[in-house]
Image (cartoon, helix red, strand yellow):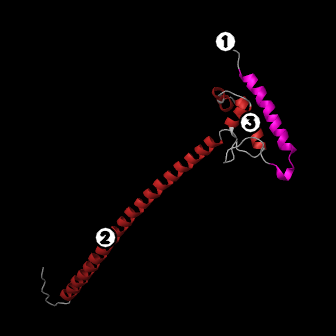
Amino acid sequence: MGRPSVIPAVRERLEQYLDQREAEFLAQPLDQRHSTLPSTADGKVNVRAVAKAIELKETQEKYLYEREELSSLINLVAEGQGLLPIGARLLQDAGDKALKERLVRQAQAARGAAQAAVEAQAVHDELLEKVRELAADNESLRAENLRLRAQLDAMSDGLYVRVSD
């Protein structure tokens, strides 16, 4: 037969502790209320201090993080007192990671777009040069065409025209 679970006993001590902290919080004047739960400098509930307050062994602290029925109790009171819940750092880190990944993707896309713009400009310049060459060839051929027509007109008028290649 296995050992009985310690979770019910931990839950009972935790509920008593949280009830006391909530009563202290509500007893404060509304405009002067501050959190009665232990907190970290960055506004998160200090789970290790809660574990010490309810006299958990170090090996039992993990229950407050891992067991949903315990962490949700702490989170309800913490959020009611304006503290960030258990796991807020993980959520923040995940959000930061997602933001960093998005920024990296945007930077890569921007680099790709800049490279594509440089290549497109090079193609544009090359095509513009080709158009200029073709326009010059067209003018040259138009002038030659006019000369040949003039020679044909002169020949049809009976003039002797010397043709050179």
Q: Quadrant of the N terminus?
A: top right
Looking at marks 2 and 3 on the same chain, the residue that comes earlier in the sequence is marked by: 3
* Drawn side of residue 123 relative to residue 141, left or right: right
Looking at marks 2 and 1 on the same chain, the residue that comes earlier in the sequence is marked by: 1
**Distance between the alpha carbons at the discs numbered 1 and 3:** 28 Å
Query: Which residue is at the front of the view, 126 or 131?
Result: 126
Q: Quadrant of the C terminus?
A: bottom left
Query: Which residue is at the front of the view, 159 or 18?
Result: 18
Residue holding disc 3: 74
Specify the amino acid type for callout 3.
Ile
Residue 11: quarter of image: top right
Which mark is drawn over residue 131?
none
SS under mark 2: helix
Specify the amino acid type for callout 1.
Gly
Looking at marks 1 and 3 on the same chain, the residue that comes earlier in the sequence is marked by: 1
| Residue displayed at 37% across by 62% down | 119
Is 103 rendered above or below residue 46? below
Closest to the camera, between mark 2 and mark 1, is: 1
SS under mark 1: loop
SS under mark 3: helix
Locate residue 87, reporting x and y percent: 65, 39
Residue holding disc 2: 130
Which mark is drawn over residue 2?
1
